[in-house]
Amino acid sequence: MSLFLTGTGTGVGKTFVAIELLHWLRSRGIRAVGMKPICCGDREDARRLLAASAEGISIEELNPVWLQSPVAPSVAAQIEQVEIDLGRIRDYFRSLSVRFDTVIVEGVGGGAKCCDVALDARVEAAGDVGETRGLARRRWDGGTRAGGHNQC
C-alpha cells in the first residue's frame, strides 16, 4: 500500500503526519518508509522521515530530488538550472514499493509535479492536511485529474 500525503501549503504539518503514520505502522510490524520526492531548501524534513522509516533506505532514495534553493520546486529548478526528472522519482517510488510494505509519499506544499507521479503510480490514497473538505488532486498543468478543490 502507498499513501500520498499533500497539504495546501508549506508548514501545514505534512511531515509531522507522515512521521506519525510511519511510527504507527511500524509499531504494528509493517515495514513502512517515507518518501519526499522533491525537497527545496534544507533537507531536514527528509532526514526526519528517514529516521522514522524502516531500515534499508538511503536519503537519496527517500529524497531523489533535492534543490537547495528554499523556494517552490519550479523556481528552484530554474535558479539551479536543472530539470526535475519525474522518471527518476517514479523509479525510486517503484523500487521502494517493491521492497517495503508501505510507502508514505509526502508532496510539497501548495502544488508540484510529484502530484502527477502519485497519480500515475496509482497511489492508493491521498489526504489534504491543510483542508478537511476533501481530497486534492490537481495536475501540474492546471487540469483537474480526479476532482478536488485545491492544487496538490
Image (tube, rainbow, N blue to C red):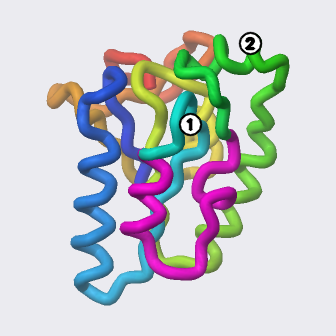
Neighbours of disc 2 within 10 Å: few (<14), some (14-19), many (20+): few
State the residue position of label 1: 39
Residue 61: which quarter of the image?
bottom right
Tell whether 2 sits left or right of 62: left
Mark 2: amino acid: Ile
For the view shown, which residue lies furthest in the left direction? 132
State which quarter of the image contains the N terminus: bottom left
Q: Residue at the spot x=56%, y=25% of the render?
A: 112
Q: Secondary structure at mark 2?
A: helix
State the residue position of label 2: 79
The stretch drawn in magenta includes residue 48:
yes
The image shows residue 51 at horizontal and vertical percentages of 41, 67
Mark 1: amino acid: Cys
Give the Cα distance between marks 1 and 2: 14 Å
Q: Is residue 81 above or below residue 117?
A: above
Q: Earlier in the sequence, mark 1 or mark 2?
A: 1
Highlighted magenta segment, given as a residue range: 45-65
